[in-house]
C-alpha cells in the first residue's frame, strides 16, 4: 500500500485559509443578525407639555404657557419599554441647560413626567430634550413662557 502525500503550494494554503475565515465570519454573523431583529427598542408614543397632570394624564396641553400658571409639566409615554431603564428630561431656556431629571421606566410600557416652577425670569423660548439611557435625544418639545 502506497501513501500519496502531496504538499500544498503557498497560494493553495492562502486560499484555504481565506475560505475558512470567510465561512467562520458568515457563521458568526448570522445569529447576531437574527437576535438584533428580535430585540424590541424603546419607543416614545407621546411627548407633550401641559399645565397639570390628573390621574396620570396630561391636562391643558399647549405650546405657550402664561407665567401665571406657576408650573409646566413635560409628560412622556413609552411603548414598548424593552427592559427597566432610565430616561432623562433635559430642560433648556434660550439654549441654556437649566435642569435634567432622571426618570425610571418599567416594562412593558410606562409614562413619566417632570415639571419646573415658573419665575418671572423664565419668560421666553424653552425646550425639553427627552433622552434615552445613553444620552441620545429621542424627542425635542419646544414651548414658550409669556406674561
Image (tube, rainbow, N blue to C red):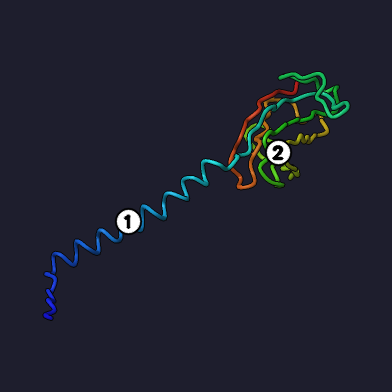
Going 74% across and 18% down the picture, which residue do you hit? 62
Q: Which residue is mark 1?
A: 23
Q: Which quadrant holds the N terminus?
A: bottom left
- Which is in the foreground here, disc 2 or disc 1? 1
Residue 13, image x, y percentages: 18, 67
- CB atoms of marks 2 and 1 within 8 Å: no
Residue 118 or residue 24, whichever sits in front: 24
Q: Secondary structure at mark 2?
A: strand
Q: Is residue 147 visible?
A: no
User: Looking at the image, can residue 69 be seen?
Assistant: yes
Q: Please determine whether, in this image, residue 97 is positioned above or below residue 25.
A: above
**Quadrant of the rendered image containing residue 112:** top right
Q: Quadrant of residue 75?
A: top right
Q: Find disc 2 in the rendering and name its residue.
A: 89
Pinpoint residue 122: horizontal percent, then vertical percent. Answer: 76, 30
x 68%, y 33%: residue:
79
- Horizontal side of 141 relative to 28 (left or right) equals right
Taking 22 as reference, is 132 above or below it?
Answer: above
Q: CA distance from mark 2 to mark 1?
A: 46 Å
Amino acid at each position: 500500500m502506497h501513501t500519496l502525500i502531496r504538499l500544498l503550494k503557498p497560494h493553495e494554503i492562502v486560499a484555504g485559509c481565506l475560505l475558512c475565515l470567510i465561512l467562520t465570519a458568515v457563521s458568526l454573523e448570522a445569529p447576531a443578525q437574527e437576535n438584533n431583529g428580535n430585540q424590541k427598542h424603546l419607543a416614545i408614543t407621546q411627548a407633550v407639555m401641559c399645565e397639570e397632570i390628573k390621574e396620570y394624564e396630561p391636562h391643558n396641553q399647549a405650546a405657550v404657557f402664561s407665567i401665571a400658571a406657576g408650573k409646566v409639566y413635560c409628560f412622556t409615554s413609552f411603548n414598548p419599554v424593552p427592559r427597566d431603564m432610565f430616561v432623562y428630561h433635559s430642560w433648556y431656556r434660550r439654549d441654556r441647560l437649566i435642569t435634567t431629571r432622571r426618570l425610571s421606566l418599567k416594562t412593558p410600557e410606562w409614562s413619566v413626567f417632570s415639571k419646573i416652577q415658573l419665575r418671572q425670569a423664565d419668560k421666553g423660548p424653552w425646550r425639553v430634550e427627552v433622552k434615552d439611557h445613553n444620552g441620545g435625544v429621542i424627542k425635542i418639545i419646544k414651548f414658550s413662557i409669556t406674561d
